[in-house]
Amino acid sequence: MKRFTFCLGLLLLLAPAWAQAVNLPTLSLGIKEASTPAEVSTAIQVLLVLTILTVAPAILLMTTAFTRIVIVLGFVRQAMGTQNSPPNQVLLGLALFLTFFVMAPTINAINAQALQPYMQEKITQQTALTRSVDIMRDFMFSQVQESELQLLIDITKEPQPADKKEVSSAILIPAFMLSELKRSFQMGFMIYVPFLVIDMLVASVLMSMGMMMLPPIVISLPFKLLLFVLVDGWQLVVGSLMKSFG
């Protein structure tokens, strides 16, 4: 007990000296005004990462090709009746990479016309943002239909725009979403038709044979899978999706 008390007292006496001998790290946070892109590059990168992590799902759904692609792929799985095959992770991953493929020209244009000039201090931050938004608007205008735009204009009771520049993003984005939903459901209907015919034929054969207790989907599923494989269905679906954005 005496030895423990002595050791404890010795540690207490040596603690100030040890703290002075060892350089302990300190953490300091601060905000200062920056005037050039080089000074704020790190802060901009952190800000962009946090912003993208927060609003990436909304941006992906509202302003890119992701909505149409993922809905059509979902219709393919439902039409075949394969339940959870392919799983959601596979469909979402395929839809994400197909979205990158479709949006590659737009992303490259933003990089060449907005990001790189700004990093080279040739344009201001506001000009870079304006150019990026204009490029994204050009993509959405290439896919949106006039009926959806007119619907949103009538709902908001805004004056009839003379050209594309007068259409606000608050009208363009929901109109683009409506157009994507409309086209994806149209493509989904065309995908459903051949599988529906197979279901009807199998159900008719089973009823004529008096096998009404046997679910038709149990018999029709192999035939639908066989048809999908024979016609190379995934290639047809993906090819049609890519051509629909042309």
Image (cartoon, helix red, strand yellow):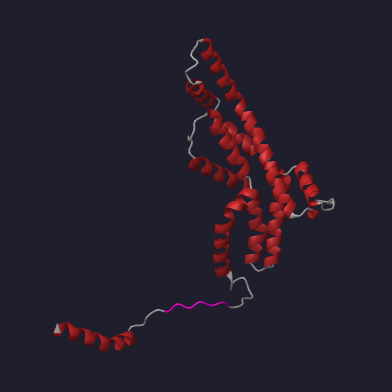
Instruction: Please identify the residue farthest to the top as the structure is shown.
Output: 209
Type of secondary structure dominating the magenta stretch: loop
Residue 86 appears at what percent x and percent y? 49, 36
Tag count in the figure?
A: 0
Q: Nearer the viewer, residue 176 or 93?
A: 176
Quadrant where the image shows the C terminus = top right
Left or right: 221 as drawn, with respect to 111: left
Instruction: Locate residue 154 relative to residue 104 in the image: left or right.
Output: right
Instruction: Please tell me in which quadrant of the rendered image residue 187 appears.
Output: top right
Please say whether residue 173 is one of the residues in the magenta stretch: no
At x 80%, y 55%, the residue is: 166
Pick the quarter of the image with the N terminus: bottom left
Q: Tell me where residue 43 appears, x and y as whole percent.
A: 56, 69
Question: At 62% from the left edge and 70% from the top edge, which residue is drawn?
Answer: 37
Q: Position of residue 56 (x, y in %)?
A: 58, 54
Residue at the far front in the pictured view: 213
Q: Residue at left 62%, top 66%?
A: 119
Q: Position of residue 170 (x, y in %)?
A: 73, 54
In this rendering, the answer to whether 116 lies above or below 9 is above
Residue at 57% in and 65% down: 47
Q: Which contiguous range is marked in magenta? A: 26-31
Q: With 94 as the anchor, is 246 left or right in this view? A: right
